[in-house]
């Protein structure tokens, strides 16, 4: 019974406080604002999923200079469609993205081109761009074959984690 009296008393106090005020939407939102996110993270699910994927890339993709990791993380951020399909299991989205790159030669070539460009930015050197059908430069860290091999190894690591 005491709890009912306390609730009634609190309601009366609340009513007295608000009785002299003019209604405003901003104040109503402010009063209720704390309840809007109860039990939910303020970080959107898509951002959470993308962050989980990018963390997995950083921790599991072997890449000494970091250019492949950086470009792949950018590709994940821009491929919201695949990531949003797999919000509850983001690594499935990563698996789809990697498979798509490996299976599509043109995408692989574009990825390698962007990785070479990123490598040039990181080391402030002229990158070695391998063209389709040409042999790679002997000093090129990121060739079509080497990137594909790294992605296949990474895909196997990804499969073993799931």
Image (spheres, rainbow, N blue to C red):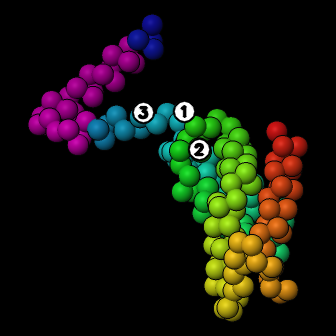
Q: Which mark is residue 86?
A: none
Report the mark closest to the observer, 1 or 2.
Answer: 2
Q: Which residue has dot 1 on it? A: 39
Query: How many residues crowd mark 3 within 10 Å: few (<14), some (14–19), many (20+)?
Result: few
Viewer-proximal residue among 81 and 127:
127
Q: Residue at the front extreme?
A: 133
Choose the circle earlier in sequence order: 2 or 3. 3
Which residue sits at x=63%, y=67%?
Answer: 110
Viewer-proximal residue among 54 and 43:
54
Magenta residues?
5-28
Disc 1 to disc 3, C-alpha distance: 9 Å
Could you say where residue 5 lies in the image, as x and y percent from the top left? 38, 13
Q: Which mark is residue 82?
A: 2
Q: Which residue has dot 3 on it? A: 35
13 horizontally vs 117: left or right: left
Report the mark closest to the observer, 2 or 3.
Answer: 2
């Amino acid at each position: 019974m005491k709890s009912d009296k306390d609730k009634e008393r609190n309601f009366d106090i609340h009513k007295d406080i608000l009785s002299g005020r003019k209604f405003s939407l901003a104040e109503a939102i402010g009063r209720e604002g704390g309840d809007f996110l109860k039990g939910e993270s303020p970080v959107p699910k898509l951002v959470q999923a993308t962050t989980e994927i990018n963390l997995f890339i950083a921790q599991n993709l072997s890449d000494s200079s970091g250019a492949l990791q950086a470009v792949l993380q950018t590709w994940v951020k821009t491929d919201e469609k695949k990531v949003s399909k797999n919000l509850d299991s983001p690594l499935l989205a990563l698996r789809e993205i990697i498979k798509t790159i490996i299976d599509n030669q043109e995408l692989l070539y574009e990825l390698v081109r962007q990785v070479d460009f990123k490598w040039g930015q990181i080391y402030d050197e002229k990158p070695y761009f391998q063209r389709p059908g040409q042999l790679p430069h002997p000093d090129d860290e990121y060739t079509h074959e080497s990137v594909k091999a790294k992605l296949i190894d990474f895909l196997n690591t990804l499969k073993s984690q799931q």
